[in-house]
Amino acid sequence: MRDEILIAPSILAADYARLGEEVKAVEGAGADWLHLDVMDGHFVPNLSFGADVIGALRKHSRLLFDAHLMCAPVDQWIEPVAKAGADRITVHAEAGPHLDRSLGAITALGKGAGVALNPATPVGVLEHVLDHLDLVLILSVNPGFGGQKFIPYAADKIRQVRALVGGRPIRIEVDGGIDPQTAPKAIAAGADVLVAGSSIFRAPDYAKAIAALRPAA
Ligand code: DX5
Ligand code: ZN
């Protein structure tokens, strides 16, 4: 049997003027991880926040900090984000020519390493780095913005990654357009960490929104 399904709210959709309170609220509402979308305005056409904001939030939360770096080049951000308190650091396979080096830098800092794949990136790029990975992040939207629609073929990619991962203890995370309608599709395909921004932070009741993403008992 697979591990339990984890819910990782993305603060990209939170109220930035009340970020500490928002993080405490999702923690109290049953979040398992906190997803931190770092955008550099170059790899993706948007800016979000960096290591200083992650470090400030670290003092307000005991959740596992799951940093998703949408940055190219990415290597210069790995150490600051690790020192700020991220527990998992995920880099994009498309961010540069030296994926193996970036993953080595993450694990050398004692952090869990992840690879993220944009919707059009084939899963084969993971093949030779599987033994260095703690997680694979499948983008089910084109990254850069919250509130987009789940791309249906992402479910096929999750299935392919599940087969590739085999018995290794690697989490498969899905990110983008996750709501109570799309979550069961991602879970059925083999995802075990669900990132959700809008469907949690735009809901009136965070606990209900998080519970609505978990598989029915
Ligand atoms: C997309 C980000 C996501 C985003 C998801 O660029 O990586 O983490 O916050 O937002 P929703 O859940 O609104 O699609
Ligand atoms: Zn993300």
Image (cartoon, rainbow, N blue to C red):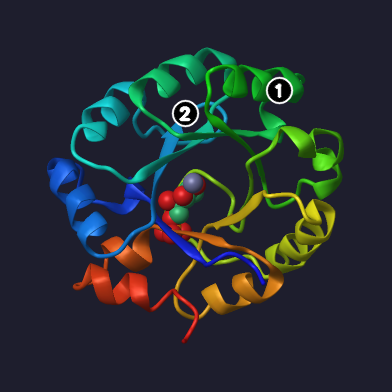
- Label 2's element? loop
Whether residue 161 appears in this view of the structure is yes
Q: Judge depth for marks 2 and 1 and give the one in front.
A: 1
- Residue at the spot of label 1: 96
Residue 216 placement (x, y as % from top left): 47, 86
- Residue at the spot of label 2: 41
First reached walking from the N terminus: tag 2 or tag 1: 2
Q: Please tell me which residue is depicted at 19% across the width and 43% down the height of the picture.
A: 19
Q: Amino acid at mark 2?
A: Gly
User: In which quarter of the view is residue 16 placed?
Assistant: top left
Whether residue 122 appears in this view of the structure is no
Residue 188 placement (x, y as % from top left): 66, 76
Residue 102 placement (x, y as % from top left): 66, 21
Is residue 122 shown above or below 158?
above
Q: Amino acid at mark 1?
A: Gly
Left or right: residue 11 versus residue 139 is left
Q: Specify the quadrant that holds the N terminus.
A: bottom right
- Label 2 within 8 A of ligand 1 by Cβ: no
